[in-house]
Amino acid sequence: MSRFILRRLGFLTLTVLLTSLLVFIVTQWLPGDVCRIILGREAGQGAIENCRLELGLDQSLPVQYLTWLGNFLTGDWGISFSTGLPIYPIVMDRLRNSLMLTLVALIISVPLAVALGVAAGLNENKPIDSTVSVGSLSVVGLPEFVTGLVLIQVFSFGLRDLGLPYLPANSSIPPQSTFLEALPMLILPALTAMLVLLAYISRLTRAGVLEELKQPYVRTADLKGLPRRNVIVKHVLRNALLPTITVIAISIGWLISGLVVIENVFNYPGLGRLMIFAIDRRDLPLLQAVIMVTVLGFALANLAADLLYGWLNPRIRLE
Amino acid sequence: MTNSSVLDIRDLTVAYHQDGQWLNAVHDVSLKIHAGETYGLVGESGSGKTTLVLAAMRYLGSGGSIRSGEIHLGDIDLMSLTEEELRQVWGRKIAFVPQNPQSSLNPSLRVGEQLVESINPQGELSPREAEKQALEWCAKVNLPDPERMAESYPHQISGGMQQRLLIAMALSTDPDLLILDEPTTNLDVTTQVVILDLLNDLIRENEAGVLYVTHNLGVIAQICDRVGVMYASEVVEEAPTHNLFSQPLHPYTQGLIDSIPQLGDTRESIQLRAISGQIPSIGKSPSGCVFRDRCPVAIEICSTRPPLYQVGESRTSRCHRWEEIVNSEIDIHQPSPGRKPTQSGDQDGPLTLETNDLSIHFPIRRSLNEVFSRQPSKSVKAVNQVDLGISPASTVGLVGESGSGKTTLARGIMGLEKKSDGSIELLQIPLPEKLFQRDLETLRLMQIVFQNPHEALNPYLPIGETLQRPLIRLAGLSNEEADIKVRELLELVRLSADYAGRLPSQLSGGEIQRVALARAFAANPELLILDEPISSLDVSVQAAILNLVNELQSDHHNSMLFISHDLSIVGYLADQIVVIYLGSLMEITGPEVLFQPPHHPYTEALLSAIPQADPNIKSSPIHLAGEIPNPADLPSGCPFHTRCPRYLGEICATTTPPWQVDQKTGKRIFCHIPLEELVANQIQIDISSAAKP
């Protein structure tokens, strides 16, 4: 197992390094001179030269890359062009918000999705199976801005009009809010994310259950005279949920940084919106930082998935 | 034997729902098993035997349904039970041992826990008591080191151990009925014999009724009291074991017995009689007697369904002509194949294939840690210093258990694996190591037929095109010539010309293996390698393929390397038998002296382990200790010394044995023990009287 972990960590490092290189190269290719962007159209040639010297842009590309990478690793992420503020605290604050949203979304989605998937798998081709399939698939087909708006309409405006307690439609939480303060504003965006995840996770769970039910060891367990519930929980689910766990871990990467649309609909200050902001303002250092954090998030989520899978699966754990 | 039955099945019909209709997988079957009795159910794949045993426990998948009939387990009416009540019966009253031990154990649970579940399915015992019993059962089925065993996961123990565990699980609740579904089919013969002996002992102790399902007549003959023969969803004959083998009363039973060579049969001494045609697929059996389209004595009356005729006190048969058969008025043997295979061609002259010191090792990748700590690189030593010679127009049979390196050796000769050492010469010309370095003529000279033809032939290429390719590319024919030749080839393997347009998936196993043979023969090779060519086929079509191989060879005078795990088949077909163990050759012998001492101790164990299809032979199999060692960690000296029942002493563990030649039999034996000593201590293996010269 330790070899397995070491190998995965090696792969992770390699992936992150490669992406950092890609991010660096791509941002080099973006049109427009960085100093021209910072100083504006009217700046004189001298000022531009000075700026280039200051940013180290006169040095060769490999040197620039290594300097950038080194600074990144030591937490010196530079100053945002557009706001003039240090990047590190901005990104970390947004990351914290994204993680809070991720947590709530997972807590809402995973138990429900797994339960629906198991129910569907154990009742193949029966009404409950078709209901789960049709229901979750029809929801996943809708874009998030549609489902998000519908949820706002119902749980925010709808409940308010009925004079009932309602959920806020705007999730623009103030900086440094605690989790409990933010919680009411997290529910609607998390529900929207859940509608996307639901179909995905429940269908995979269903497939896993169906696959394992066919295995001869289930017959062995049944014919031992074990109660059906034991057979399902102890034998079937233990193996059937392995791929599901992997997918859940991977979806964490998406939840952290991929919720651009949802964050926009609810005006939620997460990493996704920060990325859009950086792109809009051509704020290259900020963009690089956001992408690197995103990549790290994805890579770590994948690592967690692999490790969890290996740990739960003795055939890998005991290699 | 008491008269009370533990299982009483009456007129059972089980069907599967397919395309809007019910197809019978079990049709009108009745059988009774008494306490302490071992009942063998024999049949080929697709005969419905597995469906029958699952239905007997009322454990059918969602597709299957019991259409009519009664099942009584002692005084319990199984058909009247709810699922909850069935779960009280399963495990306690009926226990089941399945065919594939590996997939029948949960890969994520420790085996000890799985055994505890069987002992204590509904949690009546205290956990500690259940664990104690589990360890006792591990010891009872001879699992080494029970404590450690219980902590293992299924993938950490061998197939034989997994099967012992499943047997322990089944017997641990002291069931009234034990159902075994091909429990040894996926095991090697030396493992099989240990499991069979274990089962025999435990069954005697237990007084349970046993339903033993298998396609292997040898196993039936050795352990069953009574036999039911199943064909196309019906039990066509039932008889006490010794009666069944001495005088079968159904033409199908006779065909089954005749179609497989027994230990001691050679192609000179006996002709295999294949059953013509093929097993009907489910729901496609002919009306009337289900066997009539393959039966040599079918007459008009056979188009009506025969009732179950009672013959004497203890036998039944579903054949209209049973009286004539009992009185030996008609011959129910399948017609003999057109001609007797003859000694093929001139076997003198330079060898077709010769390997010297051939070794094939697969390097194991070292971890970074191992590289830094300078540990030597390891390799899987699949084939070690093999000297093999094949004379012109002769057949060498290579026999070995799984993991013996026989397939690797074949692939190495073909150039599909890289050799590590030694040489391979074809017609006395050294062969380039890699396949792509060999010229077309060399490729033409050697061809191979694989075990599973459905995987070996391109599934999207019509048969005709598959056959054309070697003709055009290797034999250098034009397209038109190749077209004509394809028809000749199909005729050669007894397939009609319209097969050229079909796809592999439209052919049965036997048919497609014929195509694979035709493809191999297309460019008229000097050397043909057949790697377990009949192992994936149904018993009743195996004989036809063996006969075809024989015939093709005697017409074309090719040399053959025939690889099999089955010593009786190799003994039947080959001019020379080569026994391989852990990548090293152990013994080289002629088929006619195979049973005569001296034997290599490994060959002796193999020979003694084969269950013979003759209840009069009471075999005394030799049990090999332990498991086959890991080929990455070969034992020093003689590779067999760790398991050898005739271990001499230190010399076996330290020194490579010499090749001793026995003057009387011409055998060559790779062993330290003096041949005179082997002769003095080994007894002649008892073989079926029919096979004795």
Image (cartoon, coloured by chain):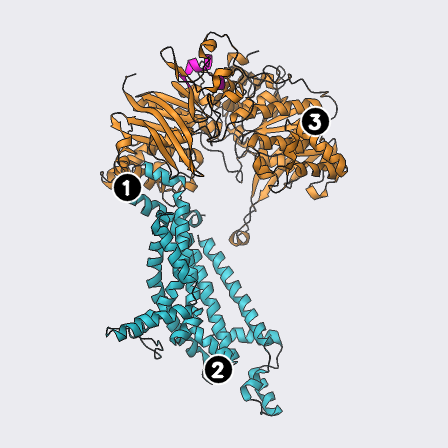
Disc 3 residue type (three-letter): Asn
**Above or below, B474 relative to B26:** below
Residue denoted by label 1: A227
The magenta segment? B237-253
Circle 3/circle 2 CB separation < 8 Å? no
Q: Which one is nearer the viewer's eye here, B662 or B103?
A: B103
Q: Using the image as rendered, state which of residue B466 and residue A269 is in the foreground.
A: B466
Report crowding for label 2: few under 14, some 14 to 19, many 20 or more residues within 10 A (C-alpha). Answer: many
Query: Residue at (51%, 38%) from the top-left corner?
Result: B630
Whether residue B334 can be seen here: yes
The chain to which mark 2 is attached is A
- Going by the numbered disc 2, the residue's amino acid type is Ser
Looking at the image, residue B411 sits to the left or right of residue B109; the answer is: right
- Residues marked 1 and 2, same chain: yes
Identify the image quadrant of residue B203. top left
Chain ID for orange: B
- Residue A80 numbered mark, or none: 2
**Labels 3 and 1 in the same subunit:** no
Image position, residue B274 (x, y; %): 56, 21
Chain containing mark 1? A
